[in-house]
Image (cartoon, helix red, strand yellow):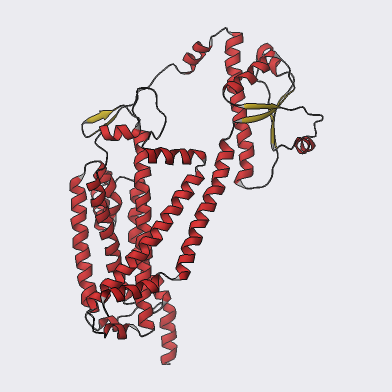
Amino acid sequence: MRFGNLLKKELRELITPQALVSMGAMLLLFIFLGQMLGDFTDSMEDISSATICVQDKTAFVDDILASLKEENIEVNQVELTSEDYAAELDRLELDNLVIIPAGFTDSVLVNKEPASLKIVSKVAGGGMISTAQTMSATEVIDAIEKAAEDSILLESYGITPEEIERIKAPVNTTEISVLNGKSAEVATEELSAVLMMQSMVVPIALFFMVMMASQMIMTAISTEKIDKTLETLLSTPVSRLSILGAKMLAAVISALLNAVVMMIGMVFYVGGMLGSAGEEMMNMAVAGQEVSASADGVMSAMEAMGELGMSISVGSYVLFGIQIFISVMIALAISLLLGAMATDIKSVQTLTMPIMLVTMIPFFVTMFADLNTMSTVPKLIMYAIPFTHAYTAMNNLVFGHTALFWGGLVYQLVFFAVCMFLAVRLFTTDKIFTMSYQTGAGKGKKGLIKQ
């Protein structure tokens, strides 16, 4: 039995039709959820049109409506025949309505007091999309208040539109970001947003790859031990190292396939969840355009990253990919050692917990904190976990922390070599058949049998 045949055997056992159906269902679920949340987001932010009932027919209100049209808000005026708002919404086939009541102008210009506006919204249910109807109407109210504010300044105090803009924005701020002795006129928030978009996807993919690959190889080994097929496989005229390599490579391929499907689903989910704004951001990222709008003469976040030396070369991506691959191989080597002790599915789930913990802890810590700012003891504990170096690799490459990157890579290689040495020693001896770990329930059953 050659290595290729062993690999095909392992792949057939891991990538089954049921597994492919599950991956497809997961992808469709992400797309559906992203589309549904995207509809909510667009509904919440959509103030391109407003349905208004004007009960105060004055030039002041007309000026406000004209200001709304200048803001590209389409104004649809309707008339109410009664104060039965439920019946009126049904008659007009509307979900929400803004009412400018009679006396609005007198309250503002004559009485010099806050005027009243009314929002009538239909409560369709407790879901987010129904909530968006009220929120979009509130946005229209804010636009009306802004237009009324400008009209008051213009009519009551004779302030010109140019002076109004100067009063509202009396200060122009220029933000300058500094990194590694270089500076660029760009907001730090913009750089952080770009770095977050670039670095958050890979850690999520690594987390899923490690978890999936570990559980797959542990399940495969424990199943063969339970079915008594491991003895037959190891007695074939094939080196045990080849068997070990075939199992690990098959687990990597299967985990990579699951991670790719998961990340595609996440892209659709996040892009759909952000609605039209997410689609625009993804198009900009693909086209290499600006991520966020900036003033004339101010460079975009992408351009600033190049000025600050934060752009990542092809070689850096290759090094990063190597570190990700080593991280997955470390997880597989540990899983081989733990999987050899599994005797049933319950024990597999229990033995997966240590890998889950050492993967989740650095994942969440690096997401919210900078390890370089931690005190010495927590920092050493985090760096002792081999998966931490994969989560921090991208930032180390971007910010020029080459010593941390290479130190982490060397540490991972040494950790992987030790784990593989132990795994090979285990598979080349008969301890692979005698090692076992049983859950409490299994121990209880065993004790009952002895009695």
Across and down, in percent, residue 399 comes to 25, 41
Examine the rendering and report whether any part of residue 244 can be seen. yes
Q: Quadrant of residue 48?
A: top right
Q: Quadrant of residue 303?
A: top left
Q: Quadrant of residue 298?
A: top left
Which residue is located at x 68 percent, y 27 percent? 76
Across and down, in percent, residue 8 comes to 34, 73
Which one is nearer the viewer's eye here, 116 or 295? 295
Farthest top residue?
158
Task: Identify the image quadrant of the C terminus.
Answer: bottom left
Farthest bottom residue?
451
Q: How many marks?
A: 0
Which residue is located at x 46 percent, y 70 percent? 17
Which residue is located at x 58 percent, y 18 percent? 149
Q: As displayed, is residue 53 above or below residue 310?
A: above
Farthest right residue?
82
Which one is nearer the viewer's eye here, 268 or 231? 268
Across and down, in percent, residue 252 comes to 32, 65
Q: As displayed, is residue 197 above or below residue 190?
A: below
Examine the rendering and report whether any part of residue 356 can be seen. no
Q: As displayed, is residue 400 above or below residue 21?
A: above
Which residue is located at x 46 percent, y 66 percent? 20
Task: Identify the image quadrant of the N terminus.
Answer: bottom left
Across and down, in percent, residue 226 comes to 38, 83
* 252 on left or right of 106: left
Which one is nearer the viewer's eye here, 195 or 241? 241
